[in-house]
Image: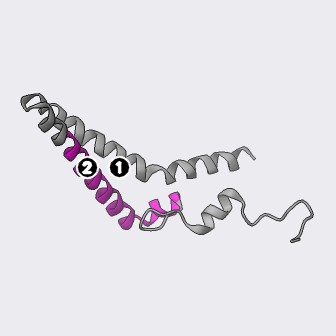
Amino acid sequence: MIWRIVRRVLRLAGWLMTPMVILAAAGAGAFLLALAAPKFSITVGLGLIGAAGLLGAIAGLLFWMKILRRSPELRQALAVTSDGVPEGKAIEEMFELDRPGPGGGSP
């Protein structure tokens, strides 16, 4: 029972890896440009920080998708497709959507 819960939590965390990678890359891009932003006016600095965050997010997404496409082992462990979308079978297993009701059969 406990291993089933651990497996579900880890799989859910794996499904959240794509947004976490993108968020980290966007934050890194924005942080790096924020170091140089004081040399510019406030509006230009904020615009540059936003642009760097967007470029970081795009670079992070492309990097993560490249890793997923090249690693079938990682896709299998995370139960995702090469596009980073959770597999339908894994979603049904995770939430037990096909579980029969308390009567034991279909209504």
| Residue 10 forms part of the magenta stretch | no
Number of callouts in the render? Answer: 2
Front of the two marks 2 and 1? 2
87, 103: nearer the viewer:
103
In the rendered structure, does residue 55 fall within the stretch colored magenta? yes
- Residue identified by numbered label 2: 54
Indicate the position of residue 32 as horizontal and vertical percent values.
19, 36
Give the residue at the far left of this rendering. Answer: 39
Asked where in the image residue 25 lies, by quadrant, the reply is top left
User: Residue 101: x and y, percent?
Assistant: 85, 62
In-image side of 92 versus 78 (left or right) = right
Residue type marked 1: Ile
Instruction: Please tell me whether residue 20 is drawn above or below residue 72 in the rendered image.
Output: above
Q: Nearer the viewer, residue 17 or 35?
A: 35
Residue drawn at the location 18% of the way across and 33% of the way down:
34
Going by the image, does 36 lie left or right of 73? left
> Which quadrant does the C terminus fall into?
bottom right
Q: Main secondary structure of the magenta part?
A: helix
Position of 62 relative to 23 (above/below): below
The outermost residue toward the top is 38
Q: Which residues are magenta?
A: 49-78
- Pointer 2: residues within 10 angstroms few (<14), some, or many (20+)? some
Residue picked out by circle 1:
22
